[in-house]
Image (spheres, rainbow, N blue to C red):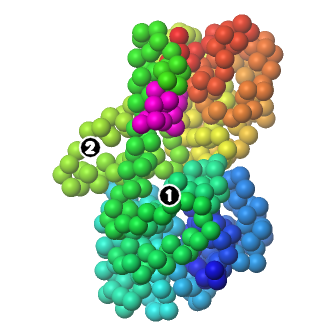
Amino acid sequence: MVGRPVAVFGGGYIGLVTGAGLAELGHRVVVRDINPEKIELLQSGDIPIYEPGLSEMIARNKERLTFTLDAQHALADAEIVYVCVDTPPSASGDADLSRVWAVVKSLAGAFHLRAVVMKSTVPVGTGTRVRAAMDAGGLAHVGYASNPEFTAEGTAVHDFLHPDRIVIGAFDEQTARLIQELHHGVDGPVVVMDVLSAEMVKLASNALLATKISFINEVATLCEKTGADVEHVARAVGLDHRLGHHFLRPGIGWGGSCFPKDSEALRQLASNTGYHLQLLSAVIEVNNLQKRRAIQKLKDELGTLAGARVALLGLTFKPGTDDMREAPSTVLAARLLAEGAEVRCWDPMGRPGAAEPWLSTSRHATPELAVEGADAAIVVTEWPQLKEVDWARAASVMRRPVLFDGRNLLDPVGMRTLGFTYISVGRP
């Protein structure tokens, strides 16, 4: 297959993975972003995010992958435009589509285009509005498709090349075929549907995954009340082929760039139609409470957090990424500081930035240094490095060896044998 010229608008997480992935498939890709520092970094051969395998894929395809600040440069030879810009929540709770509309506006006069593809997560009905705007702007002959992304941070390169499915929503069969051809070489089934349904798929998928996490966390709380072990329960439940084991992992709740935003976006979408998504509202509430329950467990054990020294082990919302967006650690740090605790932190990749609550915390190079003199530690992110810690030494340097394992990463019997007061999620 002959590679096609593609313009990707948005050099963030999804834009970079999409651009690099399409270049890997043989297409000629120009990624456009409005951030000069980001583009300069990319042009120098570096990338602004950490994602396993992404820098190697970008380097491997440098002859087919370029970066620019200039929208017209990106559009000059493009047949297909991918929209991969952020759609953060607005003050009303609806998705802020200002960046999407900025891209649509920049397409004026690009009569040579064959298709515009929406990769950004947008409310259901956005495609219909964009289609109308394109028609009014003389681009009625240019196809439009919704091609939602389902990549997970930490495995995004693999997910792009070996997806569970490729969803294509289009207004016409010709555009759907074009986008399907663009993915030639990707190992995954293609599901073609209407644009409205494709827009709903992304929101519904993330909401269901979030539901599974909140559900097992609810079960974990009940296990704590009854003496059952949630790990045994989750393992047996997950063996049911109708349910599966994915995301049945109890812990301190979900975060990241997708689950919080998409769950709220779906709930807001329902509210705007006059419908209340009761189940999803409960899912969000359970997740919000889960982090506060962790703080309460420490208070129950220590008596008070005022003057206590607490180490947060892991800051990113999940291992294998440097993403701090909506990370549970932010809520934990803020709550600990509000209770009067001193907060010490360790993470191999996370970069919290110069903002509260992180300005009031201290960073340490190793978990052992973070727990030194601490009254308690919390496993926040299940980084594999935490399994390699010399926990016997860690217990000896802590003021009080209290450990709340918020990810059920460690062995309860082994940790208690080392002298820890060991607390976990849903395990007796």
Residue at the spot of label 1:
165
The percent coordinates of residue 93 (x first, y second) are: 34, 53
Residue at the spot of label 2:
277
Report the span colored magenta. 237-251
Task: Please report whichever mark, 1 or 2, sits nearer to the chain's N-terminal start.
Answer: 1
Is 39 located above or below residue 133 in the figure? above
| Left or right: residue 77 compared with residue 268 | right
Q: Residues within 10 Å of mark 1 (few under 14, many from 20)?
A: some
Amino acid type of the residue that numbered disc 1 sits on in the rendered structure: Arg
Mark 1–mark 2 contact, CB under 8 Å?
Answer: no
Query: In the image, is residue 406 part of the stretch drawn in magenta?
Result: no
Amino acid type of the residue that numbered disc 2 sits on in the rendered structure: Leu
Instruction: Give SS at disc 1.
Output: loop
Q: Nearer the viewer, mark 1 or mark 2?
A: 1
C-alpha separation, residue under disc 1 versus residue under disc 2: 26 Å
Which of the 4 image quadrants contains residue 34? bottom right
